[in-house]
Image (cartoon, helix red, strand yellow):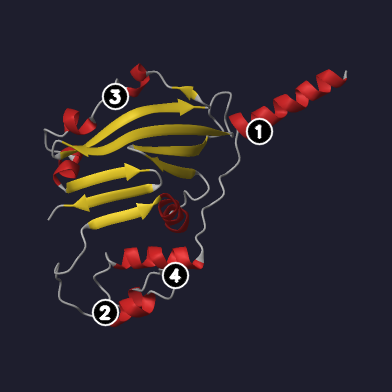
Amino acid sequence: MLLAILLTLFAVWILNSVLFPTEFKPVKLSTTEQQVLDEKLQRFERFQTQADRRASRSRPFTNTTDELTPEAYTEEGASREIRLSEKELNALLAKNTDLATRLAIDLSDRLASAKLLVHLDETFPLLGGNTVKLTAGAELAYASGKPVVKLRGVSVWGVPVPNAWLGGLKNVDLIQEFGQEPGFWKAFADGVEAIEVRDGHLLILLRE
């Protein structure tokens, strides 16, 4: 009898924590980490005056639409480098999208991985109303003068999805496959000078 109860409790735990997981805990930065991220974001903000930028380093990044002043457009001195840590990337998602509790990104050498919680509609057969966990990984690199983007795989509940169900795109270089014709992948490749993913860090250098 005791064994049956323990097995039942274990089955319930598996269903709730593995098959139907709860939401992720949003990433929060410390004050110092937030200031570092703000400074990075300010490099892409060309609408503030130099005085505004100096002042904003001491406060969290906010939308300053009501503080805009007329300013001639210029690219002089603009940084074309996007450099973010894994924690900063997840914090941006948590602060600026509705994915804070449903998406988590991991950065390792040449690999960007994601965990995504998907809530199924009530009308979905058998599993309707529940939340399922999807995981995916993509190789991101730069070689032979162009970006490399390869889907490493997608899993549902830890079970890898067959390549056939992914349209045969597993381990295929999407830039090589689709970057020759006009479209998203060609435009993306043409706009990137370099890309590097290493443990906990992302670097993208944009072209002029």
The quadrant in which residue 165 appears is top left
Disc 3 residue type (three-letter): Leu
Residue furthest to the bottom in view is 51
Residue at the right extreme, as displayed:
1
User: First in sequence: mark 1 or mark 3?
Assistant: 1
Amino acid type for the residue under numbered disc 1: Asn
Please name the residue that numbered disc 1 is placed on: 16
Name the foreground residue: 108 vs 191: 108
Question: Residue 75: percent from the left, percent from the top?
Answer: 14, 67
Q: Amino acid at mark 4?
A: Pro
The quadrant holding residue 7 is top right
Pointer 3 residue: 169
Tell me: 57 left or right of 173: right
Q: At 60% across and 31% down in the image, what residue appears?
A: 18
Picture quarter containing residue 172?
top left
Q: Secondary structure at mark 2?
A: helix
**What percent of the width, then of the height, locates residue 191?**
16, 48
Residue depth check, mark 2 versus mark 1: number of the one nearer the observer: 2
Secondary structure type for disc 4 = loop
Q: Residues within 10 Å of mark 1 (few under 14, many from 20)?
A: some
Q: Amino acid at mark 2?
A: Gln
Q: Nearer the viewer, residue 27 or 187?
A: 27
Q: Which residue is under mark 4? A: 60
Which residue is tagged 2?
50
Label 3: how many Cα within 10 Å (few below 14, some 14–19, many 20+): some
